[in-house]
Image (cartoon, grey):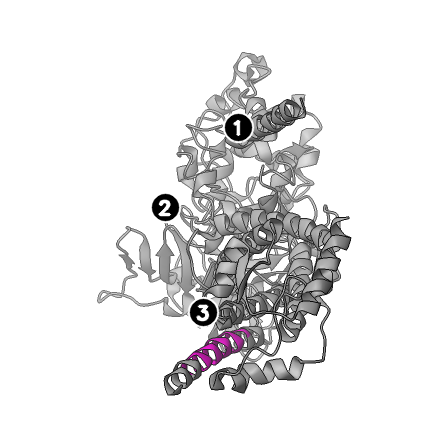
Amino acid sequence: MRKVYIYRKFERFWHWSQAALIFFLALTGFEVHDSFSLFGFENAVIYHRVASYLLLGLIAFSIFWHFTTGEWKQYIPTISKLKMQIQYYTVGMFKGAPHPTIKSPRKKLNPLQAMVYIGFKLIMAPIVILSGLLFMYYKTFDVNDTIIISSIPLNIIAIVHTLGAFLLLAFIIVHVYMTTTGHTPTSNLKGMITGWELLEEENISVDKQEKNDHDERTT
Amino acid sequence: MIKVTTFIVLATVLILLSVNLLHEDDPINKAQYELKQKYIFKPTAKVDHSQFDVLKKEFKTPQEVTETCISCHNERHIEVMHSNHWNWDRLEYVEGKGIAKLGKKNVINNFCIGSSGNEQACAKCHIGFGMDGNTFDFNNARNVDCMVCHDKSEEYIKGASMAGYPDRHVNLTQVAQHVGRPDKINCGSCHFYSGGGNNVKHGDLEESLLSCSRSTDVHMAGNGINLACVDCHTSDKHHIKGRLYSVSSTNTNRLECTECHTPKPHLNELLNRHFSKVSCQTCHIPIYAKENATKMNWLWSEAGKLDQNGQPFFEEDSMGNHSYMSIKGSFIWQKNVQPEYLWFNGKAKHYALGDTVSTFPVQINSLLGNADDPHSKIYPVKVHRGDQIYDPNTKMLIQPRLYAENKGDSAYWMDFDWELSAQAGMKEIGLPYSGEYTFVQTEMYWPINHMVSPKDEALSCNECHTSNNGRLANVNGIYIIGRDKNKWIELFGHLILIGSFVGVAIHTIARVVSSKYK
């Protein structure tokens, strides 16, 4: 076992502020959806809009960060070991088998995570964001008013947005649970808070490779 | 140096940000503010009619007064004689009928049914003298009643069942010397009391508006801007702006809120956006009949019960309004009524005398419009329900003769015999009557435009944006956020949420159990 600095400052800031915004958007969004009442409809609408702009801003920064740091490569899904990873979660971990993949700053995500997170980034998030933007700028046309979007009925936009919201909620439930499947139930969580995580030893060659990578990036 | 610069830049940004965030503007709605300033000044009379020699005489007949008016205002009577107030009908392009004449002459209502054959009584609200039947000469300018609209002395009153002639006690000289721009009571003397009593028909037009508070009506309130009817219902050549859909059918010459207010009147863009589908009235008139009750239901089928002496009688409800009258039937009155909400594009259809009906309840008038029509908006409407006499063989609603001066003239209000009054009424207008009658359910639609509430009493968001029986629960064709949910998405969403929780729970249990075995 060794302690590794795995999540950098911006990464942690991005993760937690995005988490908070998504929670808040879910809270206000489902209030607007009349699932419960908390802030009152009008406030919920206003808060939901403000939070959505903040999230858009945050996402813009995070996209920039992913590309400038090359971190986006973390999300390239690999088929190899995907089956082993699924096997581990469904069978192996109950037998006390070791993690089939080893986490490192260069390879933070196991194949299953990479698959799910890229789904999150390329499917779930765009669904809610794009439908949300359409929602915000939706105008039906009126004799005196300009047409911005009229060919997409509002109920379609609303249905897509709601569907995306449900998918995100389901993601959060499973995601939060999966953090407990690390070395200890809280080691993943601590890692995301402090940046330092207790990881299994890797073999030296990988370490070297990573060091080289790191050098390349910093020079 | 760099540190200092950075600090200064950051500090400036922070200060500017906090100034912006913490500073609360007292927002002035400039357009509205300007409107208020504009209507502070009330028009004053340009001349004093009491100084004119031609008016310093004793008038024996109301026609003499009209002649004297015309002697100076020598073109105005022509304008009046082109108006619907005079003609009781007008040419209109009616959807489904083409060019048609429509008006009080041939449409009926859901109250006292129709004026045909009952003119002696109904002409109390005709702007003429002597309209007592089919013989009235609509080209005789002497019979134009200038005074009913222009009297400022509050002396003038039309007599009951006098075919539009003034009451015998009216001092015509006094009236003639005090004429001017119409006040609320001039319009109200007919429009408040139509249907046989205060607020019977409209629900949003009644005598309390003569002196009301802002919470009753922001526009007409004595403690508000105190507008008169004609401030909004302006006229050009005695052609008055505004549509009453109990007798009108076209989307023309309407008086809309945007006549004064802009189409984007709120400082809040989200509220402005509603205007593409929601009329101003929908949110700003949350209830009508705020001060006095209005008639919501009228069952003619109940009429005709007599007391033990064989005399007609009446009963009153808890508010002191007639709940039963032998001559008219039973009524339901309501106060502080929530409107019903309908799509409306400014066009209406009417049952005209002689039309046959195939669907029930019969729509005495119906407001046209639907969600997909870009001219339609959601409007608050008073729906007046009831029943009326109907001929099941000709499939026509019957225009009964209701009023006559004496018994034995087949008038229902005298003889209480539907058979005779149906026969006489239909004969009068030249329509067939099979000799058989029954009662059918009827509905009449009155868009609500007055009794605008102050803005803090307007509808709040969640009165419509709710899935729990909100105000717009019955408005279809539109997706309303908070009201509408797609049941499949809801089902799928709940299933994956429950599935996620169940999966997580099973996994947790399996982990706990397996760790015990190790």
Q: CA distance from mark 2 to mark 1?
A: 40 Å
> Would you say residue B395 sits in the magenta stretch?
no
Q: Residues within 10 Å of mark 3 (few under 14, many from 20)?
A: few
Question: Outermost residue, front direction?
Answer: A204
Report the front residue among B472 and B6: B6
Q: What chain is tagged by disc 1? A: B
Could you tell me residue A151's position as x and y percent? 75, 61
What's the residue at 49%, 25% (across, down)?
A: B152
Q: Is residue B114 visible?
A: no
A148, above or below B224, in the image:
below
Q: Secondary structure at mark 2?
A: loop
Q: CA distance from mark 3 to mark 2?
A: 70 Å
> Would you say residue B503 sits in the magenta stretch?
yes
Report the front residue among B184 and B492: B492
Q: Is residue A34 left or right of residue B351?
A: left
Residue at the disc numbered 3: A185
Residue at the disc numbered 2: B292
Residue B25 image label: 1
Which numbered disc, 1 or 3, marks the residue closer to the eye? 3
| Magenta stretch, residue numbers | B493-509
